Image (cartoon, grey):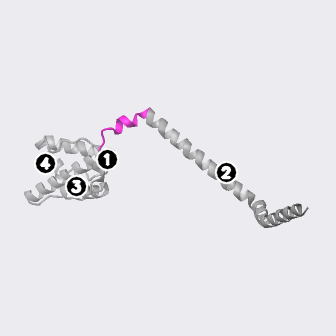
Amino acid sequence: MGVDRTLWVILALFAAACLPVLIALVFCADEILDRLVCAVSEWRERRRERRTIARLDRAVGADALTRDIDLRELDREDRLPLEQIVAELRTLGTHRTTAVGRAAVWKGGTVEAYDSRLRAACRALGIDEHLTELTGVDLEIERVRVEGLLHRAGIALPAARAEQGERHR
């Protein structure tokens, strides 16, 4: 009979030790349940997003579109950020349009630097350009075409040279 009494004492002490935990669980049950429900709903949302992205990738054929892109090109340390290229393009474009009265060497250098930045912007955005291959009027036409493509991509550049209209009158 001593064993039964010892067992009851151990159970009573265990119940007394667990009583504060049980009381805390009763008072915090709504908070615990709320956290559990939120965690499950976040997990379901992430799972749904992953499935949607996977379906879109399959529908668009994203693997085929990105297979030929070399991502190491984007991580080069000597690559300028697109924002810096655009800022330099705008500055050079303004210099190019307001080059009235400047020396021919200065104008030529400005146009060369502008074309260099146009090529850099095209490389950054994956736009085909042929600025290095052309000369004369063909180069001017290609420059306008590239500026139009950059404009369509969201890069606003200064308007074409003001003296162009005067020269053709």
* Identity, as a three-letter code, of the amino acid under mark 1: Leu
Q: Does the magenta stretch include residue 116?
A: no
* Identity, as a three-letter code, of the amino acid under mark 2: Val
At x 63% / y 48%, what residue is drawn?
40
Give the answer, above or below, for where 106 lies relative to 48. Answer: below
Give the answer, above or below, for where 146 lies relative to 109. Answer: above
Residue 144 horizontal/vertical position (percent):
22, 44
Res 101 label: none
Mark 2 or 3: the one toward you: 2
Give the answer, above or below, for where 68 lies relative to 36. Answer: above
- Front residue of 26/68: it is 26
Q: Name the residue under label 4.
A: 167
| First in residue order: circle 4 vs circle 1 | 1
Mark 2 or 4: the one toward you: 2
Q: Mark 3 points at which residue?
A: 93
* Identity, as a three-letter code, of the amino acid under mark 4: Arg
Residue 100 horizontal/vertical position (percent):
14, 58
Neighbourhood count class around disc 2 (C-alpha, 10 Å): few under 14, some 14–19, many 20 upward: few
Res 37 label: 2
| First in residue order: circle 1 vs circle 3 | 1
Mark 4 or 1: the one toward you: 1
**Helix, strand or loop at mark 3:** helix
* Identity, as a three-letter code, of the amino acid under mark 3: Gly
Contact (Cβ within 8 Å) of mark 2 with mark 3: no
Q: How far apart are the alpha carbons under marks 4 and 1? A: 45 Å
Contact (Cβ within 8 Å) of mark 1 with mark 2: no
- Front residue of 164/120: it is 120
- Front residue of 5/89: it is 5
Q: In which quarter of the image is the N terminus?
A: bottom right
Q: How far apart are the alpha carbons under marks 2 and 3? A: 57 Å
Q: How far apart are the alpha carbons under marks 3 and 4? A: 19 Å
Residues in magenta?
A: 59-70
